[in-house]
């Protein structure tokens, strides 16, 4: 019985750790608001399908999906169809990454594809 409890606790701890891993989802204003209200790490990736830099960034981010060492939630914003959101956040170019810890902006990169720099930006929200 002790072994079963120990294994259950270990499984729960492991699953709870994955909840903190990088999660990637399409932009949703409600999701963004929930993450900010909870004080969570959340990032916006202004992405355009036609942009080679965006595709390079996407490949890096997808490599970290589910990685417990990379925190937060990455919301992918359709750059071409988010004119008002771009204006709201002062985004002038596709391939822009804005990282928040709760409602505070903690990092911003544009046109960056270096995995170490992208990761460092996401980690500022820890």
Image (cartoon, rainbow, N blue to C red):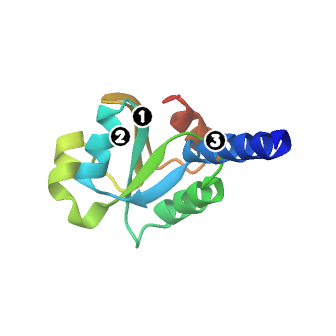
Q: Which residue sits at x=65%, y=49%?
A: 67
Residue 28 placement: quadrant: bottom left
Q: How far apart are marks 1 and 3 (CA)?
A: 15 Å
Q: Distance between the residues labelled 1 and 2?
A: 5 Å
Q: Which of 64 and 35 is in front in this view?
A: 35
User: SS of the residue at dot 2?
Assistant: helix
Q: Do the residues labelled 1 and 2 touch (CB within 8 Å)?
A: yes
Q: Which of 70 and 78 is in front in this view?
A: 70
User: SS of the residue at dot 3?
Assistant: helix
Left or right: 40 with respect to 92?
right
| Sequence order check, earlier mark of 3 and 2 | 3
Residue 21 on image: x %, y %: 59, 46
Residue under label 2, please give it: 35
Name the disc covering residue 17, or none. 3
Residue under label 1, please give it: 40
Query: In the rendered view, would you say 113 is above or below 109?
Result: below
Residue placed furthest toward the front:
1
User: SS of the residue at dot 1?
Assistant: loop
Left or right: 12 with respect to 90?
right
| Sequence order check, earlier mark of 1 and 3 | 3
């Amino acid at each position: 019985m002790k072994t079963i409890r120990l294994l259950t606790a270990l499984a729960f701890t492991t699953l709870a750790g994955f909840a903190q891993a990088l999660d990637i989802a399409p932009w949703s204003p409600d999701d963004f608001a929930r993450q900010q209200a909870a004080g969570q790490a959340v990032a916006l990736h202004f992405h355009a399908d036609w942009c080679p830099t965006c595709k390079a960034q996407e490949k890096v981010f997808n490599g970290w999906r589910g990685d417990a060492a990379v925190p937060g939630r990455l919301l992918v914003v359709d750059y071409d169809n988010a004119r008002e959101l771009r204006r709201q956040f002062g985004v002038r170019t596709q391939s822009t990454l804005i990282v928040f810890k709760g409602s505070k902006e903690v990092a911003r990169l544009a046109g960056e594809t270096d995995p170490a720099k992208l990761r460092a930006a996401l980690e500022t929200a820890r």
